[in-house]
Image (spheres, rainbow, N blue to C red):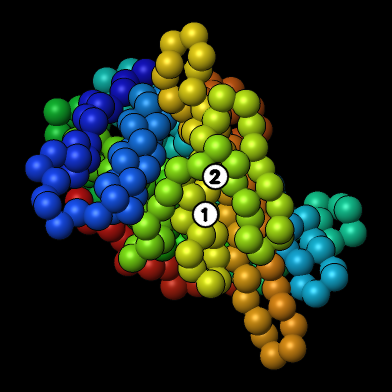
Amino acid sequence: MKSFPIIVAGLALAAGTSAQTTPAQTAGQAAELRIQGVFDKLRMNDGLHFSITGTERVDKVSTPINSDLYYQTSTDSTGRVVIKSNLIDSISPNGVPVYTSETIADGKLVWAYDRIQHTYSVVPYDVQNSQDPSLQSPTYARDLLYSMNQSASASGRSSYATRLLRELYADPSGAKYRSWMPGRTPYETSTYHDPFNNLDITAPNSVYEVYDTDPRRAIAFEIYTDPNTNEDSLSRIYFTERAQFGTKVKVTSWSLAPTATNDFSAARFAPYNRDEIRGWRPLVAPRPVRG
């Protein structure tokens, strides 16, 4: 397995704090630096699985939602890095999963399938496609992740999963966390109060870096500190969003749990075959990302 270099970023934020910096700004900077630290740690893994579980509630009717995102980095016989990914979305309106979309990055191409509309698109991300490892584009990972983010299936909760991957791996120099709620200041707390579901969440040896000052959404990063090593790791990300359509109120709530893995038996890295998409309509794909 070939890992990407790890650089602890964002330390400049803590240095040289001016006299005009308020306590809230200082606390917010510390919260985002702590998120950056657990992103750095996640980036050290060549294989990740993000499991998203939650509900979409319209008035009093709740529908379970699920997503699974797999990301694998390996090295082929020539020493060339090969990156693959698989994103699967489903809903369970009657307790039975209905698969709504799937995105497959097979090492060279991103295939996006809409399983409800029976449409698909494809876009290349291995633009250079060189078998010589010394000529491989340093932006190969970035190209894959931006192409996945452009795909039709990477929307809603899935867009946050692909965003997390992008912030972990897209920059060759290291993980780069960017605020998930620009213009809002996060804070740290031992208990996260979900303001839209009126729910308190807490876990042993954990703190929460929380953005909840937006009237439409709240986000919390649950960070676990190992009591034996004092090392931080990202346990879960909580997300809640409220939207109103006429007289109806929709509340979407989910949590994302990242896990390091080398078991990809549940992932699919090969595109659908002809029989699986017989009669489906091809769509114009987004423009390929160029490194």
Is residue 47 visible to the viewer in this orientation of the structure? no
Residue 268 percent coordinates (x, y): 59, 39
Residue 75 percent coordinates (x, y): 34, 22
Q: Mark 2 highlights which residue?
A: 237
**Residue situated in front as seen by the camera: 87 or 57:** 57
Residue 59 percent coordinates (x, y): 80, 74
Residue 21 percent coordinates (x, y): 19, 54
**Residue situated in front as seen by the camera: 113 or 164:** 164
Count how many numbered circles sit on residues in the image.
Answer: 2
Residue 219 image label: 1
Amino acid type at circle 2 is Ile
- Give the crowd class for mark 2: few <14, some 14-19, many >=20 residues within 10 Å: some
Residues marked 1 and 2 touching at CB (< 8 Å): yes
Residue 241 shown left or right of residue 20 in the figure: right
Say which residue appears at 80% left-offset and 61% top-offset. Answer: 63
Say which residue appears at 51% left-offset and 42% top-offset. Answer: 189
**Residue situated in front as seen by the camera: 13 or 1:** 13
Residue 105 shown left or right of residue 142 in the figure: right
Residue 144 shown left or right of residue 218 in the figure: left
**Residue situated in front as seen by the camera: 208 or 40:** 208
CA distance separating discs 1 and 2: 7 Å
Label 1 element class: strand
